[in-house]
Amino acid sequence: MTLAAPDRTKSRTPNPALSQHATVALIGNPNAGKTSLFNRLTGLRARTANFAGTTVEHRRAATLLGQRRIELIDLPGLYSLDAATPEERVAHSTLIGEATGQTPPDVVVLVVDATNLERNLFLTGQVLELQRPVVVALNMMDEARRGKIDIDSDELSRQLGCKVVPLSARTGEGLDELKSEITALLDAQSLPRVDATLHSCDTCGTCPYAARFHWAEGVTKQSVTSPQPLPSRHTENIDRLLTHRVFGLLSVGVVLTAIFLLIFWIAQYPMEMIDGIFAWAGETVAGRLPDNILGSLVVDGIIPGVGGMLIFLPQIVILFFLLALLEDSGYMARAAFVMDKLMHKVGLPGKAFVPMLSGHACAIPAIMSTRVIEDHRDRLATILVVPLMSCSARVPVYAMVAALLFPRQPLYASLTFVGAYGLGIVAALVMGFLFRRTLLPGRTSPLVIELPNYRLPSLRDALLLTLDRAWVFVRRAGTVILGISIVLWALATFPQMDETNPPATVTAQLSELEATGAAADEAREQILSRAALEHSALGRLGHTIEPVFRPLGFNWEIAVGVLASFAAREVVVSTLAVVYGVGEEGAEGDSLYGALRSSVWPDGTPVFGFATCMSLLVFFVLAMQCLPTNAVTRRETGGWRWPIFQIVYMTALAYSAAWLTFVIASSLT
Amino acid sequence: MFELDEQPNEQMGSPLASGDIPSPAVCRPAPAISLGELSPNHIAVVLKVTGEDADVARLKALGVCQGRQVQMVQSGDPMIIRVLGTRIGLAARLAAEVRVQPCHSC
Ligand SMILES: Nc1nc2c(ncn2[C@@H]2O[C@H](COP(=O)(O)OP(=O)(O)O)[C@@H](O)[C@H]2O)c(=O)[nH]1
Ligand SMILES: [Mg+2]
């Protein structure tokens, strides 16, 4: 770490916080280029953080400015400071230093889009009036030049009463000037001289907005020689297609299909790799560790638990990355625009569409991406229903049920999948509608959305964002999964069965096995591990709660699977493999399906008949079995109330729907 | 009759232009309508924005407020308008809260 240079101006500006950790905040309209500029100034050192006591997220990074260590903050984008959304409130309170645990930033960098000066000046006026040390970063100068917009930055600086630095976060021009202006402001905190005309407008009546725009118009006229912000021709042309009533919807379909194909197609390779690595790690560690409780905790608890979570990381990372690219290009606003009317029919805004779709890969990034929804109730309703979408963790379960029901009928098997996905979507829309009618009443907020010019997205910025979010996922999901897999392992391990003196039924099975004289080591293992599980707390719990699941057609083995999958639904398959004594390895092969098919009720009818399979499928479509998602809901809603509600309503929904399915399906067969 | 000295007319006379607005001199005042009724490609000056909720505030901060010029890019629900050079997607329900004075022959 570099020590701060001897601060010769300190006597002039008696600000004790200044010499060491001066904070510099970036503020500006959405799409003005704050994040690009932030990344330019900081690079990889940034971290994502929440503002104390809120769910509003921002990025901050410590960086060196000349000799000085500063903390750079990327505030949420906003059109005005009029504290309407949580983002605006936080940005405002951060600027004036009212945010909890924060001093006001020492320098405010106001990022202004040069191609759209007049609109950006509205916020500029508001920020200038706060009387903080401000430097205006006149961004997108490369684009302004191409559009033949000629801005006299000296004149603009005179008009605004503060320094103006023309620059481009894309090409990097002007960055050094910006840095030295920030340094100069840190040395001697001069405040902007606010123009009196900011408040005076004879023709504007009492509307404060009108007065500000009147001022912005005047400033623009003084400093820009070609004040027409030229509409981007190619944006207009592309939009004629992408916002078209029919083609717009078709394009949404095409784009999203492409995204999902990419996710599932590209992700399979890293997923196989991760699977392989964890299998290898399990074996290697098993070989090294003593064959005792501790070894079992690592080999049977922690490694498969964490591996089971990380295996979804590739899909999540790819989804994050593609969403970041689409966001950066400007397409997301079009998708929200096109879907708005349809979404309103179920009481949700168009902006809820992308999160709900992302939910088909994983609910966690989907819930994080609901931040684009301004209205609190709209956002909450979306968060509540997103986990009903069939995420990829459900796929193994669907595959199992499809294989059980339609072993050699690929058409019916794929129809099973279609049905499961359809059920999730319908359930989400219906529940969203119900929540908006009952728990979260009020009108869905009408669409107001800027359709920014299409821009070639920056791979670097998209990658940085992806890394950030992936890290949040690993941290959140990782800690939860780690804890849960330890608990599950403990439940499935204790109390231990005395292997030298197993219960009579097991002894009988074992001697039966020996009588057949088969190469029986493996079979013996399976019988023992099944017995051990039945003996354990988890097994006993399964027996205890079996009556609860009986109406759904589940036996105690399935009940154990349901319990085990409470933390992560895909666990059900491997748990069933253990319960049915085919071993973990059998989970993929036909051996599990064979064991499941041959399992019978005491009266001799098969357990996994049509009715039970259907009810199991419906249960897994609708049940909330994913603690990482709950953790993220808690984080995004700022309390335990909504995640708990989410578990309760989804479990109730899953239970009743599965019961209904079982009753109907039983009567049909 | 073209020399109305009301405020909206005065605003129109100012050479502030958004998008491809031809010379304001050819703009003639017409009866006030709601923004949603503006025909595609036509330009109008905002007279008044009613309503007070957060959505209306957002609309105003984007430039749809008294005295600004707006252009209809694509009508319907939602519609696309242009204001201060920016394209904005807007629900018809909100557009109904905006009174505008169209400039014909623009
Ligand atoms: N041509 C050009 N594009 C830029 C510049 N700065 C940002 N962009 C692009 O503008 C879009 C919005 O930038 P972003 O940093 O996400 O804006 P934010 O919403 O303010 O954080 C992205 O597509 C950027 O790649 C610039 O100086 N020149
Ligand atoms: Mg940003």
Image (spheres, rainbow, N blue to C red):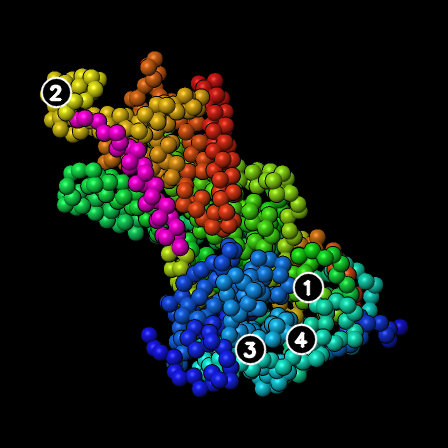
User: What residue sits right under mark 1 in the picture?
Assistant: B60
Q: Residues within 10 Å of mark 2 (few under 14, many from 20)?
A: some
On whether residue A394 falls in the magenta region, the answer is: no
Foreground mark, 1 or 3, reads 3
Q: Amino acid at mark 2?
A: Glu
Indicate the position of residue A373 as horizontal and vertical percent values. 56, 53
Indicate the position of residue A32 as horizontal and vertical percent values. 54, 70
Query: Quick one: B106 or A422, which is closer to the camera?
Result: A422
Q: Which residue is at a point 45% across and 64% down the rendered structure image?
A: A59
Indicate the position of residue A637 as horizontal and vertical percent values. 52, 49
- Quick check: B65 above or below A216? above
**Which of the 4 image quarters holds residue A514?**
top left
Q: Which portion, as a residue range, is magenta?
A: A472-499
Q: Secondary structure at mark 2?
A: helix
Q: CA distance from mark 3 to mark 4?
A: 20 Å
Looking at the rendered structure, which numbered label has been put on residue A514?
2
Residue A669 visible: yes
Foreground mark, 2 or 3, reads 3
**Residue B39 falls left or right of residue A474:** right
For marks 2 and 3, the one nearer the N-term is 3
- Quick check: A324 above or below A534? below
Q: Across the whole image, how many numbered discs are drawn on residues? A: 4
User: What residue sits right under mark 3 in the picture?
Assistant: A133
Q: Residues within 10 Å of mark 3 (few under 14, many from 20)?
A: many
Indicate the position of residue A401 as horizontal and vertical percent values. 37, 31
The answer to whether dots 1 and 2 both sit on one chain is no
Looking at the rendered structure, which numbered label has been put on residue A216?
4
Q: CA distance from mark 4 to mark 2?
A: 91 Å
